[in-house]
Image: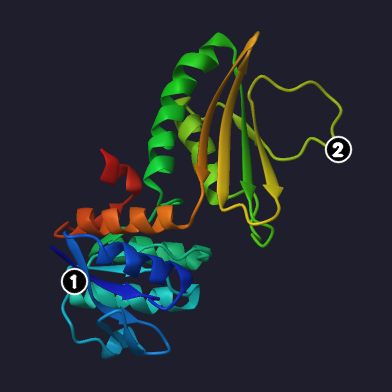
Amino acid sequence: MVDIILHGCNGRMGRMITDIVADDKDAQIVAGVDVAGGQLAGYPVYASIDDCDISADVVIDFGAAAAVDHLLDWCVEHNVPCVECTTGLSDDQIKHLEECSGRVAILKSANMSLGVNVLLKLVAEAANILADAGFDIEIVEKHHRTKVDSPSGTALALADSINEARNNEYEYVYDRSQVRQKRGEKELGISAVRGGTIVGDHDVIFAGQDEVVTFSHRAYSRAVFAKGAVQAAKYLKGKGAGHYVMADVIR
C-alpha cells in the first residue's frame, strides 16, 4: 500500500486522482493540501504543506507553480519522495528541482501518460531504422484553444527522443511560412494546432518514398495523466535520491 499526500487536491487533476485512487487497492490518499483546506473524499485537507502532520510514502503535486519551490524544500526536509506534475516551471525552478533531487527522490516528466512514454521509446527505435532509409520525420501536435505554450512539451520530448537516438543530427523547424525552399534532409518539423477542447493529440510521421508510417497518441481525457501520476507514486515509494522520469516507471 502506498500512502499519498495529494498537493493541489481541490483542482481538476487533484479530483481526478482522488477518484482513481479510491478504486485502487494498492494506494490511498492520507492527506490533501489546498489553500481552501477542509475535508475531501474522506481525507483531511490542509491549507499548507507545513500544517500537514500525517506521514506518507510520497507526495503527488498538481498544484500551482508558485508553490513548487517550497513543496520541494519540504520534501527534502521530511525525506518524502515527490511526483512533480505541475507545469509552467521557470528555469530557476527546474534548477532547484535538480538540486533537490540530489537529496530526495523526485519524478518529473514532460508527460505523465504511460502511453506517451511508451511512444517515446517506439519513435526512437523507429528513427534508427527509418532515418537511414531516407524517411523524413514530422511531428504534429493538437491541443485545446486555451493552451498557451507552443509547441507542447510532449512534442519537444518526442523530437528529443528521436534526435538523441540519432546523435542529435536533426534541426527542429517550427515554421516554414517565411521560407521558400526544399525541405532539408536533416529537418525535423514540429507543427502545432490549437482549437476547441482537444486534450492532447500527437502524431509522429515518418514519410518515405511511396509509404508513410505514423505513430499516434490520443488523450481523450486528462485522466490518463492522473493515472500515470498514481503509477509513478507507486514506483517512487522507497526510492533513493535522484531525478526519475516516466521512462523509469515503464522499464
User: Dot 2, how many residues are within 10 Å of its Cα: few (below 14), some (14-19), or many (20+)?
Assistant: few
> Of the residues under marks 2 and 1, which one precedes in the sequence?
1
In the figure, 132 relative to 195: above or below? above
Q: Which mark is residue 178?
A: 2
Q: Quadrant of residue 145?
A: bottom right
Residue 242 image offset from top left, x and y in percent: 25, 55
Q: Quadrant of the C terminus?
A: top left
Q: Quadrant of residue 101?
A: bottom left
User: Dot 1, how many residues are within 10 Å of its Cα: few (below 14), some (14-19), or many (20+)?
Assistant: some
Residue 250 lies left or right of residue 127; in this view the side is left
User: Badge 1 is on which residue?
Assistant: 79
In the figure, 250 relative to 162: above or below? below
Q: Secondary structure at mark 2?
A: loop
Tell me the amino acid under the disc marked 1. Asn
Taking the spot 12% from the left edge, 62% from the top edge, the residue there is 1
Q: Is residue 124 visible?
A: yes
Q: Is residue 102 visible?
A: no
Taking the spot 68% from the left edge, 45% from the top edge, the residue there is 192
Residue 212 image offset from top left, x and y in percent: 60, 17
Residue 167 lies left or right of residue 205; in this view the side is left
C-alpha gap between disc 2 and disc 1: 52 Å
Q: Secondary structure at mark 1?
A: loop
Residue 31 image offset from top left, x and y in percent: 25, 79
In the figure, 208 relative to 100: above or below? above
Q: Which mark is residue 114?
A: none
In the figure, 185 relative to 151: above or below? above
Taking the spot 37% from the left edge, 45% from the top edge, the residue there is 114
